[in-house]
Image: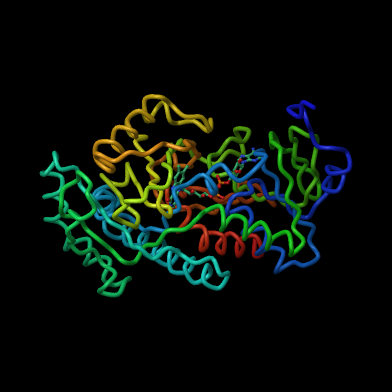
């Protein structure tokens, strides 16, 4: 049987044609806000829809770093945002990392506590020197938010057998996770609480009605009292679209390697490249800066140019003289604010309509607190 034309049956859709809150987007944000709302309003019929058949455009397609910014990334934020906004961003990210860590422990989803490194290209010593010169500024900012053992310190990484500069910067404060496990936990908890999650529904337009919204979708109209948009990359009809642009991030992962010498999260060059272990595998992503216009898309494919470049970094720098296979490649969509601000926004563009956006590449750390802010706004508006 060819199931490529399988649409949603009358029975499935009919259960949702009218609801108290329609959440668009079944990623971390959408599932979490649905659950938080259900806990506060037991009698609301809450429905989450997503156009994807499985997972989410970012939440199950990311690298799984619970992080707050490498030193070079923090220095770039200091330059572009200034000290106050940079401090504010760091506080939110670090609170998010700590909160997620505690919640994961409570849910028996053990975080991978291997810490995070910034590593440097050996053939760009001036960049590394600049970051080392400014490291005290970074650590001064972080020292109010982290224990002394959690700020960045210089470490030797020659034993890792990579071809980066032998000296790196390390923090014990970040951790790694399997994002699909966290997503599955949210899915199960939301469904157990009575939230309905429907997939394969692409939301297209909105018409305000007396007591709420009539929402046009690929599968017909859904009527609801409230709309909560957690779609991340922003692809709604013009009047409701948050001011964000999609940005595609590409990733590859190897087979299991017996001789892997290291564990942890690794950041390079203001976060434009990142890699980590997953067990004995190596995951590598990034290089979007090589073609920003081409990667400003919510298409979930890959581009040969960026994949070739990632393979080059993998072969020459991460796993020199080692044999391995690239087992899988994929991409996901981030949402960046159009005005280049990095603060997450909770907005209410119309009556009974809220949206949450602006995580950029940091939604793992940021979504716990941002969904609390969204909850308070929905309950108090
Ligand atoms: C490759 C990559 C690596 C990343 N690595 C990290 C990392 O290591 N650490 C970190 O902190 N962050 C990382 N991020 C960012 C992080 O994954 C995201 O910020 C976070 O997952 C966003 O969660 P969300 O629920 O807001 O969005 P999503 O997970 O994208 O969920 C939104 C959902 O809305 C759906 N949707 C959108 N529009 C519609 C519509 N019109 N109709 C129906 N459905 C719709 C989409 O299909 C999508 O599934 C990465 C992102 C990518 C792409």
Residue 227 vs 380, above or below: the answer is: above
Which residue is pictured at 24% across the width and 39% down the height? 321
Q: Looking at the image, is 311 positioned above or below residue 375? A: above
Q: Residue at x 66, y 46 (%)?
A: 24
In x, y percent, where is residue 52?
A: 65, 39
**Is 375 left or right of 75, judged from the image as shown?**
right
Indicate left or right for 324 with 59 as reference: left
Name the residue: 17% across, 61% down: 154
The foreground one among 163 and 181 is 163
Left or right side of 35 for 344 = left
Please identify the quadrant where the C terminus is shown: bottom right
Q: Which of the pair 97/344 is nearer the observer?
A: 97
Q: Position of residue 337 (x, y in %)?
A: 45, 43
Residue at 44% x, 48% y is 63
Task: Name above or below for residue 259 compared with residue 92.
Answer: above
- Count of number-bearing discs: 0
Work out which quarter of the rendered image holds the N terminus and state it. Answer: top right
Percent across and percent down for residue 38 are: 72, 64
Q: Nearer the viewer, residue 182 or 151?
A: 182
Q: Position of residue 184 (x, y in %)?
A: 62, 56
Colour scheme of this structure image? Answer: rainbow
């Amino acid at each position: 049987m060819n199931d490529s034309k399988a649409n949603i049956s009358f029975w499935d859709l009919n259960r949702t044609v009218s609801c108290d809150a329609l959440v668009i987007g079944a990623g971390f944000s959408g599932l979490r806000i649905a659950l938080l709302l259900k806990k506060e309003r037991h009698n609301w019929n809450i429905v989450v829809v997503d156009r994807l058949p499985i997972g989410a455009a970012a939440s199950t397609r990311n690298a799984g770093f619970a992080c707050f910014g490498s030193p070079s990334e923090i220095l770039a934020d200091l330059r572009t945002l200034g000290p106050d906004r940079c401090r504010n961003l760091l506080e939110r990210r670090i609170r998010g990392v700590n909160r997620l860590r505690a919640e994961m422990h409570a849910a028996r989803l053990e975080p991978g506590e291997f810490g995070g490194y910034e590593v440097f290209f050996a053939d760009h010593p001036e960049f590394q020197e600049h970051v080392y010169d400014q490291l005290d500024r970074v650590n001064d900012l972080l020292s109010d938010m982290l224990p002394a053992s959690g700020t960045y310190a210089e470490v030797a990484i020659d034993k890792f057998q990579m071809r980066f500069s032998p000296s790196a910067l390390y923090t014990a404060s970040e951790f790694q996770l399997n994002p699909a496990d966290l997503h599955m936990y949210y899915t199960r908890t939301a469904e157990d609480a009575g939230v309905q999650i429907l997939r394969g529904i692409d939301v297209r337009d909105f018409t305000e009605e007396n007591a709420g919204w009539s929402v046009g979708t690929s599968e017909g109209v859904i009527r609801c009292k409230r709309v909560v948009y957690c779609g991340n990359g922003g692809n709604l009809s013009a009047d409701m679209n948050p001011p964000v642009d999609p940005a595609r991030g590409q990733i590859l992962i190897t087979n299991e390697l017996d001789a892997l010498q290291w564990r942890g999260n690794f950041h390079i060059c203001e976060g434009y490249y990142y890699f980590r272990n997953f067990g004995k595998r190596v995951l590598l992503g990034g290089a979007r800066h090589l073609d920003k216009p081409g990667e400003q898309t919510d298409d979930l494919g890959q581009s040969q140019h960026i994949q070739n470049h990632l393979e080059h970094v993998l072969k020459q720098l991460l796993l020199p003289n080692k044999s391995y296979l690239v087992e899988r490649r994929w991409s996901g969509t981030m949402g960046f604010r159009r005005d280049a601000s990095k603060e997450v926004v909770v907005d209410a563009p119309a009556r009974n309509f809220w949206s949450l956006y602006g995580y950029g590449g940091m939604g793992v750390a940021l979504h716990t607190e941002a969904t609390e802010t969204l909850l308070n706004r929905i309950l108090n508006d």
